[in-house]
Amino acid sequence: MASQSLHHHFASLHLRARRPRKAPTSSPPRPLTVAAVSSKNPPLSGRKLRAAVIGGGPAGSSAAESLASGGVETFLFERSPSAAKPCGGAIPLCMLDEFDLPPSLVDRRVTEMRIISPSNLTVDFGKTLRPHEFIAMLRREVLDSFLRSRAQSRGAELITGLVTDLELPRSSASPYVVHYTSGGLRRSLAVDVVVGADGANSRVAKAIGAGDYSYAIAFQERIRLPDEKMKYYENLAEMYLGDDVSPDFYAWVFPKCDHVAVGTGTVRSKREIKAYQRGIRERVRPKIAGGEVIKVEAHPIPEHPRPVRVRDRVALVGDAAGYVTKCSGEGIYFAAKSGRMCGEGIVRASEGGARMVGEEDLRREYLRQWDDRYVSTYRVLDLLEKVFYRSNWGREAMVELCGGEYVQRVSLESYMYKRLVEGDRWEGVKMAANTVATLVRCKIMGGASEGDRIAGVGSARFDRLIVKVVTCKKKKKKMMMALMMSLVSVYWFFPRSKSKAFPLMKKRCTLTTATEK
Ligand SMILES: Cc1cc2nc3c(=O)[nH]c(=O)nc-3n(C[C@H](O)[C@H](O)[C@H](O)COP(=O)(O)OP(=O)(O)OC[C@H]3O[C@@H](n4cnc5c(N)ncnc54)[C@H](O)[C@@H]3O)c2cc1C
């Protein structure tokens, strides 16, 4: 009984913030009484749960909106609300509905998505789009400011300030103290819960010792084009593949209201990023001739989630957690979604801000639900990146495969609606066999020119084999042949890391398990 009452006791605490060093003036942290966290979270007396969301990008604003709407006292910190996050600004169709984004936010509705191989083989990825479908292109400054305003309108208090330090609680009964500078003053705020949504260079992640992730560096120029050139990109986006534009990613031309964003990224050769940018400029030279560079920007893109994403009463979301997918480098939707899932999870666990929450609540209500929903997506894209993005022949094969209607539809569905498609079984077998054949053929033919590839001398034998597999009438035999070809290809594609490839993926993708549990 005594120990129970100890667990459930309310510790009254008035915070003493770290004394500011040379600040002209400072404000004392708002006093806060924190309830000690136990297996049965006690109700808070006379106040609501108080949350600080650090970072006002899509992740932070979505978290703040959910928290404030659910009855939690919410403070949203953003260092520069008027700045534009370096970003291509492509978002999937489902995000417009799910996040109730007004059509006016969208600069361009892209219906042609060209993917261009190292040998300039071009496939239009948009040919299987349905009449109402498109890929939305927007400017991040527009999206971010809309989401922040909406969070404010739901009751979140926006603090324009740079968070300089997060002071961790000395006991489970102490609050977190957010130290920040705003309007030239050093200030502090005591809170119960912290959501780290402060992007790839997250201070919150550092403060809780969340560990590092490998990252790509992305570089982008915004180029204003003459009207006639802009017309070409009216509803067209382009993705370029090849060693000249990136050794392990893709380069892009994405249309915006009055300009195009031309950029590239790399994990392996970050120092060469400018050379790769020259590479993409060279590939699109005639299309951007006469353009004026209006902005140059660069930023890291996380490659995989951090080893730790929840610790005590702190949760990481968006880029701070590392939620960008391989292959596409997509992070906006996952940032907003993780912010929302985390915010809603805290609201549920705290019963609308009436109770304290603890680490187990954050794991149960946010982390596990996130992993259940998205880990397989990250696994698939991780595998595709390993197979297709590491050599020019792999990229050639990928572009060829993208020409197939079934491949296109399956990829578009999973990108646009964020759901894994129930595919047709035989189409799936055909696709697997075709993938193997195309990869093998492209490997054999290496970096052949487009003309050579079309002539396809070396490919005839593989084509015949594929035709045999696909047209074989005996189902069992067909399955066996396809399976054998898949196994050969797996062996073929991981020559240097045969033994490591799968354990490595497993380690990366079961992120919660090892370090967090
Ligand atoms: C060049 C480039 C192109 C990209 N293109 C695409 C694309 O086309 N589509 C796509 O889906 N994804 C794209 N991404 C990825 C996407 O930009 C990110 O995944 C997404 O922005 C993550 O959102 P977030 O809210 O987690 O973080 P961010 O958008 O990085 O937001 C973090 C916010 O926190 C604020 N902040 C940081 N530190 C502090 C602090 N100490 N105090 C106060 N505020 C702070 C920042 O000012 C910022 O507003 C691209 C990324 C890059 C770099």
Image (spheres, rainbow, N blue to C red):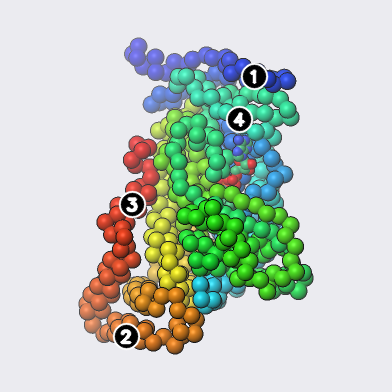
Label 2 or label 3, whichever comes before in sequence order: 2
Which disc number belongs to residue 164? 4
* Disc 4: CA contacts within 10 A as few (<14), some (14-19) or many (>=20): some
Please report contact status of discs 1 and 2: CB closer than 8 Å, yes or no.
Answer: no
- The yes-or-no answer for disc 1 within 8 Å of ligand 1 is no
Q: Residue at point 41% right, 85% down? A: 456
The CA distance from mark 3 to mark 1 is 46 Å
Q: CA distance from mark 1 to mark 2?
A: 74 Å
Q: What's under tag 2, amino acid-wise?
A: Arg
Q: Is residue 190 above or below residue 227?
A: above
Q: Which residue is mark 2?
A: 461
Disc 2 beta carbon < 8 A from ligand 1?
no
Q: Nearer the viewer, residue 280 or 325?
A: 280
- Mark 4 and ligand 1: say if the CB distance to the nearest ligand atom is below 8 Å: yes
For marks 2 and 3, give the CA distance.
34 Å
Determine whether the residue tagged by mark 4 lies in a helix, strand or loop: strand
Amino acid type assigned to the residue bearing label 1 in the image? Arg
Q: Amino acid at mark 3?
A: Leu
* Mark 2 in CB contact with mark 3 (< 8 angstroms): no
What label does residue 309 carry, if any? none
* Crowding near the residue tagged with mark 2, few <14, some 14–19, many ≥20 C-alpha atoms within 10 Å: few
Q: Are marks 4 and 1 in contact (CB under 8 Å)?
A: no
